[in-house]
Image (cartoon, grey):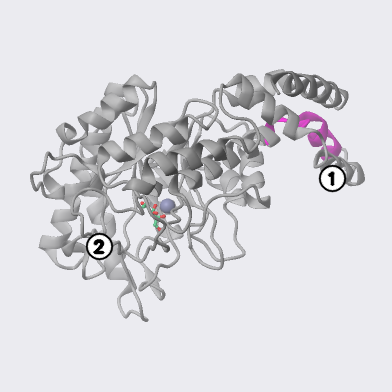
């Protein structure tokens, strides 16, 4: 098998060389790209704060496939298994509800670095960076549908304090891991039906964000990000943190903007937004997801938009400006497989983009040779990409092709099916 993979790679290398692409250097670059795996695919965004927690905030994980992680140890074990099937070194993206408080109830505004030491030690021993998120949903104080933009001052303050606590946790994570932690704020705030006061909540949200970001934190430890959204379940008519709102806020305050693939009108794509946004911002965060008719958070697959996202990152030479995060949660299939499928697809898309003769394509475009530009783009689709991918997996000591599936099945039999 190994021999076959190597031989196929040598042939593919020649084929790519003919169109001016160096496969060795593409692989080299790919190995340096980290994708931030979201912990919440492992337990349907449940967290460990309360075993009976019901996911709200207008997001939904549908399905009841058996075997979800019930404790932080189980989740770490599942992550380790998933990571062993994914080539490269990646990051872990945590939510505040994944705190480990040793059985004690700790309110979200009182969370601190001490509740994340296990996660930090786990990440450090694997050479991984961490990213973080305040959890402004699935909580009695979010039941009204409003958090940071609430007109109830007690509620608003509580969430401001929670976000301040989270930035400090992010700072700690960044310091400990030696890689800046992106702390991303997403809130569900909005109205189901047509509101009267669109302006009021947005002014309150601005004020809350200003309070949250007042404390200065070294950017080499923590990077602040804000995530916009068009609508959620129960907030169909109005979402306070819209695209224009956060775009304006991020530009004015030099924050990162998070573009989630499912947070726009169905025919809008984030791939086309990247270069616009990065004309005015230094860095952005992506939540790579797959909306199917709505913000359904399906597992990412190698579809046109995923490839386009990767192409924009590579063609724009944006690797040091774009933090690639995943955001999907499917409870209807094996959760570990979902991580593996989605993350491997993200990496495949990046490899595809790295295997483009970008300079040649650019020149064709600049010369007005649109015939050849189109022809080349289509020819690229049947280049022996799979051989390069298999070789990259082999080199990274992870299964090639669909061989990873057997490992997931075995793990299901011996571990997750017994939960
Ligand atoms: C919700 C946002 C948000 C969440 C996670 C769990 O629509 O996409 O990023 O998915 O924070
Ligand atoms: Zn998101």
Q: Residues within 10 Å of mark 2 (few under 14, many from 20)?
A: many
Q: Of label 2 and label 1, which has the lower sequence position?
A: 2
Q: Magenta span has 150?
A: no
| Percent coordinates x, y for residue 72 in the rendering | 26, 39
Q: Residues within 10 Å of mark 1 (few under 14, many from 20)?
A: few
Tell me the tag on residue 389: none
Residue at disc 2, secondary structure: loop
Q: Residue at x 64, y 25 (%)?
A: 392
Count how many numbered circles sit on residues in the image.
2
Q: Is residue 279 above or below residue 201?
A: above
**Residue behind mark 2:** 149
Q: Nearer the viewer, residue 165 or 397?
A: 397
Quarter where residue 395 is shown: top right
Q: Is 284 placed left or right of 137 in the picture? A: right
**Residue behind mark 1:** 378
Residue at disc 1, secondary structure: helix
Inspect this view and state whether residue 281 appears: no
Principal secondary structure, stretch drawn in magenta: helix
What residue span does the magenta drawing correspond to?
Answer: 353-366
Q: Is 116 placed left or right of 374 in the picture? A: left
Q: Residue at x 35, y 77 (%)?
A: 192
| Percent coordinates x, y for residue 280 in the rendering | 51, 43
Q: Magenta span has 365?
A: yes
| Percent coordinates x, y for residue 216 in the rendering | 24, 33
Image quadrant occupied by the N terminus: top right
Q: Is residue 164 above or below residue 16?
A: below
Q: Residue at x 36, y 50 (%)?
A: 67
Mark 2 and mark 1 residues within 8 Å of each other at the beta carbon: no
Which residue is at the far left?
A: 104
Q: Nearer the viewer, residue 31 or 178?
A: 31
Displayed-image quarter of ligand 1? bottom left
């Amino acid at each position: 098998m190994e021999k076959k993979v190597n031989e196929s790679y040598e042939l593919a290398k020649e084929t790519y060389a003919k169109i001016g692409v160096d496969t060795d250097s593409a692989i080299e670059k790919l190995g340096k790209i980290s994708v931030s795996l979201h912990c919440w695919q492992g337990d349907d965004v449940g967290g460990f704060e309360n075993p009976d927690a019901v996911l709200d905030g207008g997001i939904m994980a549908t399905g009841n496939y058996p075997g979800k992680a019930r404790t932080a140890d189980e989740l770490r074990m599942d992550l380790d298994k998933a990571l062993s099937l994914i080539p490269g070194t990646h990051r872990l993206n945590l939510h505040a509800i994944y705190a480990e408080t040793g059985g004690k109830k700790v309110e979200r505004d009182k969370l601190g670095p001490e509740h994340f030491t296990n996660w930090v030690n786990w990440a450090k021993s694997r050479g991984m960076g961490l990213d973080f998120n305040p959890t402004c949903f699935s909580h009695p104080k979010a039941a009204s549908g409003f958090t940071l933009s609430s007109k109830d001052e007690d509620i608003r303050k509580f969430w401001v304090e929670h976000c301040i606590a989270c930035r400090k946790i992010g700072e700690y994570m960044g310091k400990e891991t030696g890689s800046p932690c992106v702390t991303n704020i997403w809130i569900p705030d909005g109205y189901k039906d047509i509101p009267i006061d669109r302006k009021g909540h947005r002014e309150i949200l601005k004020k809350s964000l200003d309070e949250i970001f007042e404390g200065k934190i070294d950017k080499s430890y923590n990077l602040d990000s804000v995530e916009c959204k068009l609508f959620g379940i129960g907030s169909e008519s109005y979402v306070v943190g819209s695209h224009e709102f956060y775009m304006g806020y991020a530009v004015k305050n030099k924050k990162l903007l998070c573009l989630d693939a499912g947070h726009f009108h169905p025919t809008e794509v984030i791939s086309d937004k990247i270069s616009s946004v990065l004309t005015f911002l230094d860095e952005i965060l992506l939540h790579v997801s797959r909306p199917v008719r709505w913000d359904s958070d399906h597992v990412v697959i190698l579809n046109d938009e995923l490839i386009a996202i990767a192409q924009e990152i590579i063609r724009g030479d944006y690797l040091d400006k774009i933090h690639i995060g995943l955001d999907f949660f499917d409870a209807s299939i094996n959760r570990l497989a979902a991580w593996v499928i989605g993350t491997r697809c993200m990496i495949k898309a990046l490899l595809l983009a790295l295997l483009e003769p970008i300079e040649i394509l650019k020149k064709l475009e600049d010369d007005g040779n649109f015939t050849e530009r189109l022809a080349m783009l289509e020819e690229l689709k049947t280049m022996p990409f799979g051989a390069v991918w298999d070789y990259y997996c082999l080199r990274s000591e992870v299964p090639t092709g669909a061989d990873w599936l057997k490992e997931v099945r075995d793990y299901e039999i011996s571990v997750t099916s017994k939960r």
